[in-house]
Structure formats: structure tokens, C-alpha cells
Amino acid sequence: MTMPRETSRFGEAEALEPRRGRGRFFGPGVRNVFRFHGLRVDRALHNIIYFAYYDLYVPTFVKIGRFLAARFGHTKLVHAMYDMVYSRYHAKVITPNEFTKILTLNEDVAFGPDTTKQIIPFAYANDVILEEPEYIAVMDCPCRLSRDNPCEPLTVCMGVGRHFAELWMEVGERYHVRQVSQAEALQILKDARARGAITAAWFKVATGARTGVICSCCSCCCRGLEGMRIASQLTGGRPLTNVAPSGYRVVIDEESCIECETCSDVCSFDAMTRDASGTRTYHSHLCLGCGLCVEHCQGEGLSLELDEGKGLPLDLDMARQALGRRVPVA
């Protein structure tokens, strides 16, 4: 549902002031974080530290998780630890249809929480909230920064909405943060997909439990996708994941297929494979519905359709219908 505002700021966003040195921790973005979290000062500090030092935070977190999974992945305790973390820190794969609506938005939206798990199938951090969406900042990807030979460009992580963009502009100097327009943001995502990166919206309780952080994730660098693969090795309980599929499956038009093999080359999840003879097999249960194979297919023989078994897409129009309860915008 639309959240009205007394003074409209849609269109060209006002320039956000970057901050340097110690002053970066005393700006309006930081103050808003404390105001948002209220008495949960621990979450406010977590929020600020995460974005200010996430090139250290993310790989350290994954390293600890990898160690626990390798040594104690068969135990119920480690399974419960992963379950606790992933229910609070996770992603939803999105396609150009979804992110185009987000990056051309000209109103505040607030839907959720998604208690039915139709769109965001996790117990926590499942609100669809975009406040002043014309404010967008991008900065270096912590996953790529942590790799020895990372994919480029590095500056592909995106914060949509003033809640994120203002904070990033204050604490993200070391990550080459900059403010971008909606058109520039769209082009960044399109360029990343042309290079084979999927698009994912990330949610984290400590950072507001809301939509807003959009990443271009390559399978070779992304620590989140690495976390998904680590979780698949746990044997102490039910299957776990931190990455929810988009809600689509691939439809193959065999008559249009020209055997270019691009679909299997671009897929990072073994959903499209070929045997020694070149015969293609589509493994629907492994598909995250990212849409890369559709976009890269040279014969235009692939398309996406809704898959009822994988929930609903993070489509703002669908969210408006499915998530009726209003969440106050901070």
C-alpha cells in the first residue's frame, strides 16, 4: 500500500552528503539507524558495524560457518545455529521484471511482514519496505573484495531507499560509495547480468529486516551463494538454504532451440546440464529462476513462468495483493 508523504521528493533525489573520518558515525543516516532500532541498541550497532566494516565481517562470518559445517555439520546443534542465522539473514532471487519495478518506483511502499512465507519464506526479515526509493547508493561488494582475483567491477552492491543510501554514504567511504540515479542503478544491474551475475535482494534483521539491499551475485565470488552450498552439506536436520528462488521456472521451446549451449554455460546451479552427447537436461528442483539462461539464449527458445512450488516472486504488484498488512515506514 502507498505511504503518503507531506513533501514529495520523488524524481531527482537530493544529493546525500558523504562523510569522512570520525564524523561519518555522527550523520543523519547513523542517527536514523538508532532511531529505527529504538531500545535495541545492539541491533543498531550491528547495523552500522556491518556496513562500515563488512569487507571483514562477511568473509569472517563465512569462514567460521565453513569450519563448523566441516567439523560438526552432522550435529543438530550446528544445524540449529545455521537455521537461526539463515532465518535472520537471507536473500530472494529477483529477475529484471522485479528489479525494474523497484528501480522505477515513484512512491513509498510498505507490505508485510510475510508471515505466510509466500514471497520471502523465512521467519524473520521478511518486510517489503522501500522508503524514498529514489535515493540509491552503490559501493564495493564485500564478497568480491575478499577474493584474491575477484570479478570486476567491484562496485555492484546497491542500497535502495534513503534508509540504506544515507547510511552508506556516511560509512562507506572505504568502499568507493557513490550516489546514483534510478537509471544508473538499472544499468548497473543489466550490465552485471550480461556478465553472468544473478540478482538477489538481501534481508537482514539487524539492517532493518526490509527490502533494499540488491546485489549482483556471481557464483565464483558471492559469499552468500557459498553459504547456500555449505548449508546443503549439513545433515543434522531438514534441508536449509539462505537463498530463496525467484518463484519462476524455465519453459523450453524445443523448436526454437539452436543448440547454442549458452543455457548450460551460464547456469551456476547445475539446473541446465548436458551429457557427453550434448543432450540438455533441465533440473527444475535445482533452478533458482534467476532468468539468466532466458536472457542469454541465442535462439530465444527459453522463457519463465510461475512455479507454484517455489512461492511468489518479489514483485511489488503481487506483494501489494498478497501482503495486506501495513508496516510503518521508519
Image (cartoon, rainbow, N blue to C red):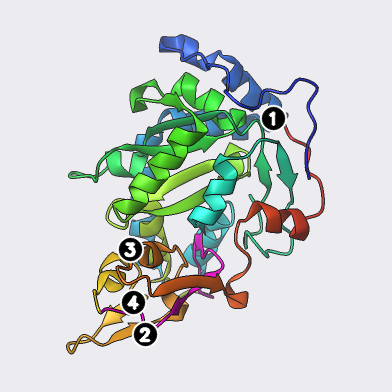
Q: Amino acid at mark 4?
A: Met
Frontmost residue, 106 versus 171 = 106
- Tell me, yes or no, whether the two marked residues, 4 and 2, touch with CB atoms within 8 Å: no
- Tell me, yes or no, whether the two marked residues, 2 and 3, touch with CB atoms within 8 Å: no
* Residue 70 drawn at (x, y percent): 33, 65
* Residue 292 drawn at (x, y percent): 38, 62
- Tell me, yes or no, whether the two marked residues, 2 and 1, touch with CB atoms within 8 Å: no
Frontmost of labels 1 and 3 is: 3
CA distance separating discs 1 and 3: 41 Å
Image-based side of 171 in relation to 153, left or right: right
Q: Residues within 10 Å of mark 2 (few under 14, many from 20)?
A: few
User: Which residue is disc 3 drawn over?
Assistant: 296
Quarter occupied by residue 104: top right
Of the 4 image quadrants, the one containing the N terminus is top right
Is residue 118 positioned above or below 64 on the image?
below
User: Which residue is disc 2 drawn over?
Assistant: 255
Quarter occupied by residue 156: top left
Q: Determine the secondary structure under disc 4.
A: strand
Q: Amino acid at mark 1?
A: Phe
Frontmost of labels 2 and 1 is: 2
Q: What's drawn in magenta, residue-wise?
A: 237-258
Q: Residue at x 53, y 25 (%)?
A: 167
CA distance separating discs 4 and 2: 17 Å
User: Which residue is disc 4 drawn over?
Assistant: 272
Q: Magenta includes 250?
A: yes
Image-based side of 320 in relation to 227, left or right: right
Frontmost of labels 2 and 3 is: 2
Disc nearer the start of the sequence (4/3): 4
Of the 4 image quadrants, the one containing the C terminus is top right
Q: Residues within 10 Å of mark 1 (few under 14, many from 20)?
A: some
User: Which residue is disc 1 drawn over?
Assistant: 36
Disc nearer the start of the sequence (2/3): 2
